[in-house]
Amino acid sequence: MWWRRRDDASRVGKDVVTEAGTTVETQGATQATPGQAYPPPETWPTGRLLSAAARRVERAWDAYLQQWDLTHASVPVLVVLSRGSLSQREIAAKMHVTEQSIGRVLRGLQANGHITRAPHPGDRRRHVVELTPAGLEALHALDHAQSVESLIGTSLSPQETAELRVLLIKMIADLPLQEEREEV
């Protein structure tokens, strides 16, 4: 049985074709075939490593946020609202997402007492979304630096963590706006 896969962006345009029961070595990375152990992380491309690490940290972050009945999607909304009241449309625009996406997040925040929504005094079609004292308190509490930093584990030294931060900030600053639209 033959199978084909398209290599990742770091190996653009290269196809790996293997026959069941064989392993093909490509650019220093061993490719597993069905029935064999998958290659270890040391052989993965950088983007995949970053994605796997991000998923693990995100799961830890989500568990941490549950203390305040928050999700990773609701925190940026609280940050935006900490600067003042806005309509749902304005929040969506600032977050670079659809009003529908923000609506789901706002319903959860309202149900947990982090925001209020009230009719706009000058436009009955709009609602004003406002951060509650409980929402502001949660926003300030969740940024306890030591607790948040502990979510990445203990495998990195403080110096390595500082270096990682510099590199991640550099990467994030260089991402195109399209990537930010998907990040709520």
Image (spheres, helix red, strand yellow):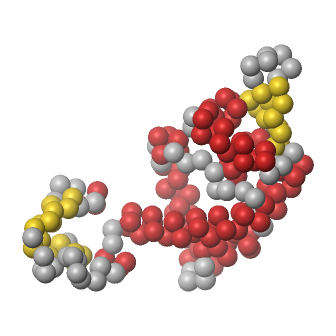
Of residue 117 and residue 91, the one placed in the foreground of this image is 117
User: Residue 113: x percent and y percent?
Assistant: 84, 49
Classify 115 as above or below 53. above
> Residue 183: where, in percent of width, then height?
55, 48
Q: Which of 146 and 32 is in front in this view?
A: 32
Q: Which of 60 and 106 is in front in this view?
A: 106
Does the image show residue 143?
no
Q: Would you say 26 lies left or right of 87 here? A: left
Locate residue 2, reporting x and y percent.
10, 67
Tag count: 0
| Residue at point 64%, 73% (across, down) | 151
* Corner quadrant of residue 27: bottom left
Residue 101 sits above or below residue 153 on the image: above
Q: Residue at coordinates 39% horizontally, 63% vertically from top-left?
A: 47
Where is residue 6? Give x, y as percent: 21, 58
In the image, is 152 to the left or to the right of 36? right
Q: In which quarter of the image is residue 128?
A: top right
The residue positioned 83% from the left and 25% from the top of the image is 119
Residue 84 horizontal side relative to residue 103, left or right: right
In which quadrant of the rendered view does residue 144 lie? bottom right
* Quarter of the rendering occupied by the N terminus: bottom left
- Please name the residue shown 70% across and 32% down the image: 88
Residue 4 shows in this picture: yes
Residue lying at the far right in this picture: please name it. Answer: 133
Q: In the figure, 143 relative to 125: above or below?
A: below
